[in-house]
Amino acid sequence: MPSSIPDTSEKWTGAINTVVIGATPEEGGTRTSTVRIGGAGALPFLGFEGSVGRRAAIAVEVWDSGGEGWPEPLRKVYGDALSSPGEWAKKAVEFGAEMICLRLAGAHPDAGNRSAQQCAEAVKEVLSAVGEPLIVWGCGVDEKDNDILPAASAAARNENALIGTAREKNYRTLVAVCLADKHKLIAESPLDINIAKQVNILCSDAGYPLNDIVIYPTTSALGYGVEYVYSIQERARQAALRGDKLMAQPVICDVGFEAWRVKEAKAPAFPTVTDANRGRWGVIWEAATAMVLLQAGAELLVMRHPDAIREAKKAVERFMPASKT
Amino acid sequence: MYVIGERINGMFENVKQAIRSKNAKVIQDLARRQLAAGAWALDVNVGPAASDAKGAMLWLVESIRAVTDAPLSIDTARWDVMSAVVPQVSGDKILNSSKADPEIASQYVGLAVQHGAGLIGLTIDAEGVPGNVEKRVELGAQIITIAMEGGLPLEKLFIDPIILPVNVAPKNPEHCMQAIAQLKLFADPPPHLLLGLSNVSQRCAERSLINSTYVAMAMAHGLDAAIMDPLDPALMSTAITAELLLGKMIYCDSYLDAARHK
């Protein structure tokens, strides 16, 4: 009687949604490329259990204003571009951005309180500077976001941008705006899988298609609870692969923002730090955080430093099969 | 929970009338409403409504197929009706049902395999419904073995340990739960465990409460499918909540609503 090793691979019944961001002229927009994320039918890197979906994409972060305050190692690589969203976006593309993530940081009431019109102008500036698809990220203050995001959305009408964030207590305006201007939507939750699911169902009940949502389950940096971030994403992913359609959304991670605000990145105080390597710690912190989140199954990483981007891309290209078109 | 909607059954007066007057709208409306309420499949039973059981079953199937491709549970105790109707049912189907006697069960398994159908196997044989747990498990195991030998994948097999009304068979609900728990361990992956749930409260007061309570109890023992009334919102909400408490879904405040998103 022939002996055989029993097949112990997981048989998943669900899959992560595929979401396309960006619209070319044929699709009514002005982008020169589009980005397609998602599609996994198995856990990350476990290709023998099913399709691992499309390769993770990397977006590079640009601010409407306030970049001058970024940590020194970043100021060094971006230079004067940090004071102009358009120039900044061009640098980002040079550094390997497949998408631009425009954060309307200057709209925050404590950081400039820039107007809806100014935000819309920043959106237009980035759109005309580069051809990559656009992510627009609000300032995180409910009332202010409800003022600036409609204007930002209108400025990118028909570009099939990804706009966020919709939150449990503040989603109706953004849902309506994204439906009207034909954008994809980021649904945010505060490191809480129950709320992640709840925000999705709220957006769905408000008329937004579940298939067009990208979720932001909150990111944190290495050393600051990234293992908790990982386990939340892993649980959501397992539920999705077992068929939970309210957890089947691709995940965006805010890697650069989180990595570059921890002290180890900005002002490392380890015994081995020298003036010569001081600037590398942030790069390493950002790259390492990115690696962890890729293993959690993140589909879209928002990053900052060109060297960290290069490391993350190297990992993606080495370990994830090329996306089929 | 794999809910098979029970409402298209000639035992119900409106269905009986619809079959007699060939009023497809009544049947189609029931099909749509049950699916919208969360049923995954629809049971189809002619009941005592027609002298031509075969013709009436085919008419019901045809009427339903005009509005949905949902799996249909062809519910008849007559082999001549089952074997004549099943080849003519398009799409997914479940044979409801076979008894456990080897010669009967292998006949049904063969028909199910031939048509890619599911099969409900009752833990009942020539001697009738067992009065204890052991015999139920024995008969259930017998059906599982025959299904495996006949090439029916166990994810297409539903074992029904036969629930009797609690007012006439007070020990029966407990027996069924124990049988479910034991049969769940019999194979890996296990077959589905199913009940014709409403029977537990036949001719009782508080039917919805009894059905709801029992479905939660039985699910805790491993029940994962039932022929039941999806139009009873309390019952459906209880089944969803039991699933939540058994760790089969991720909680959110709108979990009832979420569970209805298929």
Image (cartoon, coloured by chain):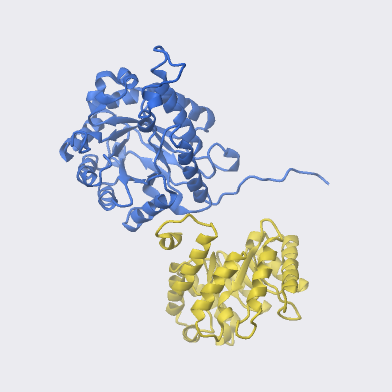
Closer-to-camera residue (B3/A219): A219
Q: Give coordinates of residue B87: x percent, y percent.
A: 62, 69
Residue positioned 45% across, 42% down in the render: A38
Q: Is residue B83 visible?
A: no
Residue positioned 52% across, 48% down in the render: A238
Residue positioned 72% across, 73% down in the render: B133
Q: Give coordinates of residue A222: x percent, y percent.
A: 45, 31
Q: Is residue B87 positioned above or below A299 on the image?
A: below
Give the letter of the blue chain.
A
Q: Is residue B126 visible?
A: yes
Q: Is residue B192 positioned above or below A11 on the image?
A: below
In the image, taking residue B224 as reference, residue A72 lies left or right, namely left
In the image, taking residue A310 as reference, residue A158 lies left or right, namely left
Residue A308 appears in which quarter of the rendering?
top left
Give the letter of the yellow chain.
B
Q: Give coordinates of residue B42: x percent, y percent.
A: 52, 71
